[in-house]
Image: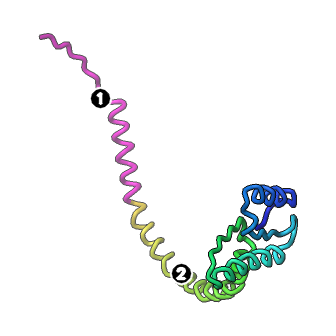
Amino acid sequence: MHVSSQQEVDEMVAELSKAGAMRNTTVVSAAEGCGVGERYAALCSALSMGERVRDQGGHSFVVLDDISCMVRPFLDDISCMVRPFLDDISCMVRPFLDDISCMVRPVLDDISCMVRPVLDDISCMVKSFQWLSSSHLCSCNALVST
């Protein structure tokens, strides 16, 4: 078990002893500030002890409060294996994307040339409508009585 300090280990052992649980309990801890290798060794030792009890027909209950020492090296290994693969894919995909860009750019330019006059016409119509609505329409007030 990985805990913050030796004092916490001592307190935990005292509490387990007071409850009568230390007769069947082994506490495995890594020292405060220890490296990943020491934490990994403590974790493997605790798991091995639990497996031995199980293999001999007994019951074991292993509590781990930190498995980062197992996960971090695994992720580093995966990263080292995947990074070259991603670099290779990037080298293969980049020219393809450049080719697509070269093919799409003229099409977009053509569409822009076709759409721009239409947008200009719509803009002129909107401006004309605004001019009509603001200056040439009168408001009428009606009194309705029933």
**Circle 1 residue:** 137
Range covered by the magenta-colored residues: 118-146
Query: Residue visible at 83% across and 69% down?
Result: 30
Front position in the image: 121 or 18: 18
In the figure, 4 relative to 97: above or below? Answer: above
Camera-side residue: 8 or 97? 8
- Residue 64: give x, y in percent of width and height: 70, 68
Looking at the picture, how far across and down is residue 73, in whole percent? Answer: 74, 79
Nearest to the observer: residue 104 or residue 80: 80
Inter-mark Cα distance, 1 to 2: 52 Å
Q: How is the image coloured?
A: rainbow
Residue 26's image quarter?
bottom right
Task: Give the main secondary structure of the magenta stretch.
Answer: helix
Q: Amino acid at mark 2?
A: Cys
Q: Is residue 52 left or right of residue 98?
A: right
Q: What kind of residue is marked 1?
A: Leu
Under circle 2, the secondary element is helix
Return the x and y of residue 101 as percentages of the image width and height.
53, 78
Q: Which residue is mark 2?
A: 102
Is 122 part of what is drawn in magenta?
Answer: yes
- Left or right: residue 132 compared with residue 61: left
**Does 37 sit left or right of 61 as displayed?**
right
Q: Nearer the viewer, residue 97 or 61?
A: 61
